[in-house]
Amino acid sequence: MIVVAHLYYPKWAQGHGEATLSYDVSGYYLYLPAVFIYDDLRDVAFLPDIIEKYHPTDDPYQTFTHESGKQVMKYSLGQAILYAPFFTVAHAYASASDTYPADGFSRPYQLSISFGGLLVSFLGLYFLQRVLRRYYSGRTTSITLLLITFATNYLNYAAIDNALTHNWLFTLYALLLHLTHRLYYRKHRRAREFGYGRCLSIGLLLGLMALTRPTEILAVLIPLFWGIRIQAGAFATRWRLLAKNLPQIGLAVVACIAVGTLQLLYWKYVTDDWIVYSYQDQGFDWWQPHLIDGLFSYKAGWLTYTPAMWIALIGFWPLYRRRQGTFLAPLLFFVLFVYVAFAWSVWWYGGSLGQRTMVQAYPVLAFPLAASVSWVLRRGGALKSVFIVVAVVFVAHNLWFTHQAHRGGLLMIEWMNRAYYWRTLFTFEVDTDDQLLLDNPEFYRGTPDRIDTLYTNGFETSYPAACTMNPIAGSGSLCLMGRRDASEEFFVNVDLQGRQWVRASVDCRIRTARPRVHYSTQLVLRFYRDGVELKERVIRLHRVLNAEMDRNVYIEARAPRGGADAVSVLLWNGGDSQPAIVIDNLVVATLE
């Protein structure tokens, strides 16, 4: 983890959106410079200058303008509290330094927060190791920790993107599990009375977790249900135990609420309202949670990008059979956590390697994961060999994706689909043509036996004098610019059989790259029957034109299953404010 954090990809040494204090992290962190450097918690007037100087984001979404006219932080302040010790060290150094400005975002702050994230990672693994050793052998515990670290996206969020909340919450969950075990067990015997100190610690910890991410209040299920076996009278026994310790539990509740009140005090101070919903147009789709997408999609499915966690899910069965005391709490927590996580409208959680929102749940899932490992180790033989092979594949899978996310360039976050995923998996050479699969998953594999041309257009009839480029061929080309930001729709009447391949190709020329993919010129292929559009496929030409500004590009797709009697092609420039693009030699053909 040290090698990854400081030699492979030192995020603290990166700039702009790849810096430690960028995007969401800069939003979590913003409380600290606002209070301790600029004394400006209400207006955050320093933020535009910070964005202009350091470019942590493309747009300042970290705050929004409240109806009171004040600027309100989007994110709650729990993560800023966790950053505070490392911010203090960085600010003391920067203030005494003649090299770095003490502005909250210079190199000392980037390095200190990144180093703090790595230190927190080590603490998380330490506490997780301690609690696992209470239930499993040293060998099982070691293998479990190795799987979590190397075979899951925890490696990325512990060593590289470790300033995000997930790594810090991972450690808080590990600490919560450690404290919960000590609450119920003393010298391997059940305790009948809870200690005030441990209850206070658990209450403060739960409050801090919820203050960091409000949905982490679900963590309360762990101390409530830990140690309960699935047997008659188990819940009644737990209820009596809780009733006997009401003063201690009351202390924990008060401590939790006291920590949460800090957010209310911030809102009251800034807006004069006790409660402010800071996520504005984002929210929860409670009745239509995105469970299938969140778990399995190629865009950001948890089990698609972290398949090692199938071992943990399978492990709930041996966990139930052999260690029921650690079964119910993790199961209840996991089910509700997944539901809440994927009920969020932005279920892919922005720029994420797999599902980053699941990382903090790994300490809880370490118990069924360890149960699977223990079950395999007890049986040995061929099963053990198969497990080793599968584990190695999962490790390679995770390391490959971690590399592609940062240095390899093949992971296209938020755009991934099945075609591109399997086309590029375990490859290392970047082929820009493969990126067209991110828009259109259909492509003709191999070489066709016959290509029958249906339509050609050399665009020779007119050429606007205002176009900033010469025609590609002949005396004219299609120039999309200004108000002419889209072509007409070119129709071809043809009798297509079901699933028959069609290709449309154009020669393209640009002078200015467009790094923002949403503003790419689009080549559109449509299929019709009886005047009704049946199917549409699109590619964004600038995915490949940014690398090679003068080239031929084509789109391929299959006709609908019922066939089609017409196809059409059109081009759209991505908006009338985009630079000009020249198109020539449109060819529509069928592939046999």
Image (cartoon, rainbow, N blue to C red):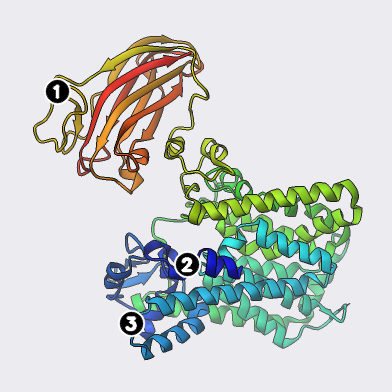
Q: Is residue 500 above or below residue 228?
A: above
Task: Indicate which label's residue lies in the foreground, 3 or 1.
Answer: 1
Numbered disc 3: secondary structure? loop
Amino acid at the residue labelled 1: Ser
Asked which secondary structure carries label 1, the reply is loop
Q: CA distance from mark 2 to mark 1?
A: 51 Å
**Which residue bears the numbered disc 2?**
11
Q: Residues within 10 Å of mark 2 (few under 14, many from 20)?
A: many
Please name which of the two marks, 2 or 1, marks the residue nearer to the observer.
1
Q: Quadrant of the N terminus?
A: bottom right
Earlier in the chain: of badge 2 and badge 1, it is 2
Q: Residues within 10 Å of mark 3 (few under 14, many from 20)?
A: some
Q: Nearer the viewer, residue 591 or 548?
A: 548
Q: Secondary structure at mark 2?
A: helix
Residue 541, given in percent of the width and then of the height, sits at: 34, 36
Residue type at mark 2: give it.
Lys
Of 152 and 188, which appears nearest the observer? Answer: 152
Residue at (48% x, 11% y) in the render: 497
Q: Position of residue 445 (x, y in %)?
A: 52, 25
- Give 218 or 348, whichever is nearer the viewer: 348
Residue at the extreme bottom: 96
Q: Check contact, mark 2 vs mark 3: CB within 8 A.
A: no
Q: Position of residue 543 (x, y in %)?
A: 37, 40
Decide: is 274 above or below 338: below
Label annotation for residue 101: 3
Residue 475 bears which disc, if any?
Answer: 1
Which numbered disc, 3 or 1, marks the residue that appears first in the sequence?
A: 3
Residue 302 percent location from the top left of the image: 60, 50
Q: Is residue 284 visible?
A: no
What mark, if any, has residue 197 been given in the picture? Answer: none
Separation (CA) of disc 2 from disc 3: 19 Å
